[in-house]
Amino acid sequence: MMLPPPAELERICKGLATLDAILSEDWELRFFSFNATWDASRGERMASMRNGEGDAWFLVFTGGYVFFKAFWHEHRRGVPDEVYDGLPAALERQRQAPASSMDDVTFGGWYDPERGWTMRGAYEPFAEEWAILTGATDVVIAYAASCLSVDVPRDAVEHVLAGKPLDEAVVARIAAGRTLESLQADLDEIVY
């Protein structure tokens, strides 16, 4: 399974982070995050997932490129030099960044505008975990039900994943009591 093209993947990651922000006021309890100004001077945006059990992924969008690193704590570690062999020079900085520590990598890869996706390491068993990055509504609804114990209306999930403008009614349908005002700092960071 390959990831969607960068623009679509970025929209999905922003949607996942926005849904998590609506569903959980406490940042520490969220699985997904998106920082649209990760390194503003370089135009880098960062998306991440951490499930609180030691599993995580990290994506950096820069220019037309994407850097991807994932770690699943119960699976064998990849060899960073093998996983990132052939990494485009435009992404080498990401590999060296403290946030993408190569001590813990199960699989990883990158998107090169000329060649598409390259994925390496033991990624085949993770099709189910990756499915959320396709933006499939059913997968996102199942995530909310199993991980957050909430039922989220299908049309509201589709609205957010599509990157459509939020209003009070959509926010209230996802999480009663949450308001656009209470989400403003999160939405500013995500640039939803």
Image: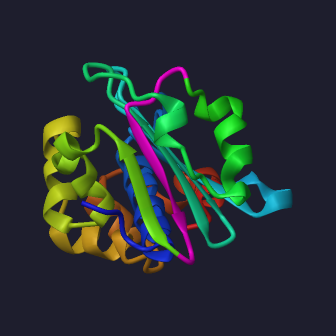
Q: Quadrant of the C terminus?
A: bottom right
Magenta includes 108? yes
Give residue 37's position: percent from left, percent from top.
72, 56
Left or right, residue 14 beside residue 191: left
Q: Is 109 situated above or below 154? A: above
Left or right, residue 4 beside residue 82: left
Colour basis: rainbow
Which contiguous range is marked in magenta?
Answer: 103-114
Q: Is 48 situated above or below 91? A: above
Give residue 189's position: percent from left, percent from top.
64, 54
Magenta includes 118? no
Give residue 117's position: percent from left, percent from top.
43, 65
Residue 150 visible from this viewpoint: no
Q: Quadrant of the N terminus?
A: bottom left
Residue reaching furthest to the right: 41
Q: Residue at x 30, y 53 (%)?
A: 176
Q: Residue at x 32, y 58 (%)?
A: 133
Q: Quadrant of residue 141?
A: bottom left
Residue 146 visible from this viewpoint: yes
Give residue 156's position: percent from left, percent from top.
26, 70
Q: How many numbered discs sit on the rendered protein?
A: 0
Pick the front one: 92 or 177: 92
Left or right, residue 138 beside residue 60: left
Q: Residue at x 69, y 70 (%)?
A: 63
Q: Residue at x 38, y 56 (%)?
A: 16
